[in-house]
Amino acid sequence: MNQQSSTAVLTPLVRRGSPAPGTELLRRLRRSRASVAGAVVILVFTLVAVFAAALAPYDPIQTDTSVAFGPPSVLHWFGTDNLGRDILSRIVHGARISLWIGIISVAIGAAVGTVLGLLAGYYARVVDSVIMRLTDAMLAFPGILLALIFVAALGSNLVNLMIAVGISSVPRYARLVRGSVLSAKENVYVEAARAIGCDNPRIMFRHILPNVIAPVIVVSTLGVAAAILAAASLSFLGLGIQPPTPEWGAMLSGGRDYLRTAWWITVFPGLAITLVVLSTNMLGDGLRDALDPRLKT
């Protein structure tokens, strides 16, 4: 290798005066008003979840049948349910559970799927065949059905619900990472890492993973919304969070029998789910555009 090519290889990727990658990402993300609005809404719900105990006007599980089916009023802004529990307080406390489910479920699915995708894409042949056939078998089932099977097998509680929703999303991340690794492992920097004696785990996690993680971040953002919907659906079917724990899907299920006479029991939890899912999707779309190298100027 001549001196000129050596200088080109050793030239740092970030030159003096160029913005840091995180700063550049935020700058491109701010161009999209929809993604900024989504981020603001998610931040608000996150703060509500963190400070739920201070913000909720009433105990979310305390019953008072004397005010059951109370419509929205000054005392109860979102009304009360069939047991006299304050809907607003239950939504505020339910935000903590729903967001926790979304984040932990996505973390489980992304972590397991990323490792499987790295192994399948890097080693190929037998390892690739076994992992991909397993993911194909899981993809043969709809995600909600797969989660339902895991919940039915493990039991209905918060931990099992997060595990079930997370495992059902593993194939999505595995196939995404595998495709990216198949392309990335042919690059020059991988050959250079092998030439200087790096072992396979170091090459996969130190050199390849940082270069394929961007699409995983985008899909994970969108996956939070899908996980919240899946958890709400399972709770609606009675296989998720069990009463009296305030969870948005369980609240929808509890109010469906009173939709004509007490619409607020169902409408307000439904609006909370809609806002969080829509905002997460908007933020995910913005991240996708910001991380897309074809859109960089």
Image: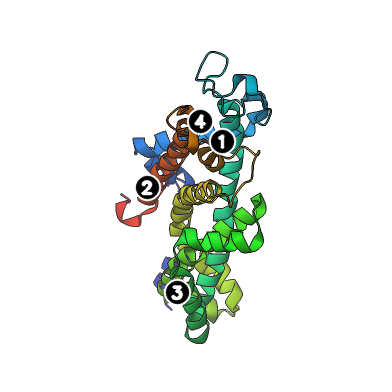
Give above or below for 82 relative to 184: above
Density class for disc 2 (Cα within 10 Å; few <14, some 14-19, many ≥20) is many
Q: Earlier in the sequence, mark 1 or mark 3?
A: 1
The part of the image, by quadrant, that contains residue 47 is: top right
The type of residue carrying mark 2 is: Asp
Q: In this view, does 286 lie to the left or right of 118?
A: left
Q: Which type of secondary structure does the marked residue at label 2 adopt?
A: helix
Q: Judge by depth and name the residue closer to the eye, 56 or 223.
A: 56
Q: Which residue is drawn at 44% across and 36% down?
A: 275
The type of residue carrying mark 1 is: Thr
Q: Tell me if I can see residue 135 in this picture.
A: yes
Q: Tell me if I can see residue 211 in this picture.
A: no
Q: In this view, does 32 lie to the left or right of 162?
A: left
Q: What residue sits right under mark 1 in the picture?
A: 46
Mark 1 and mark 3: span between their CA atoms? 35 Å
Q: Which of marks 1 and 2 is nearer the N terminus?
A: 1
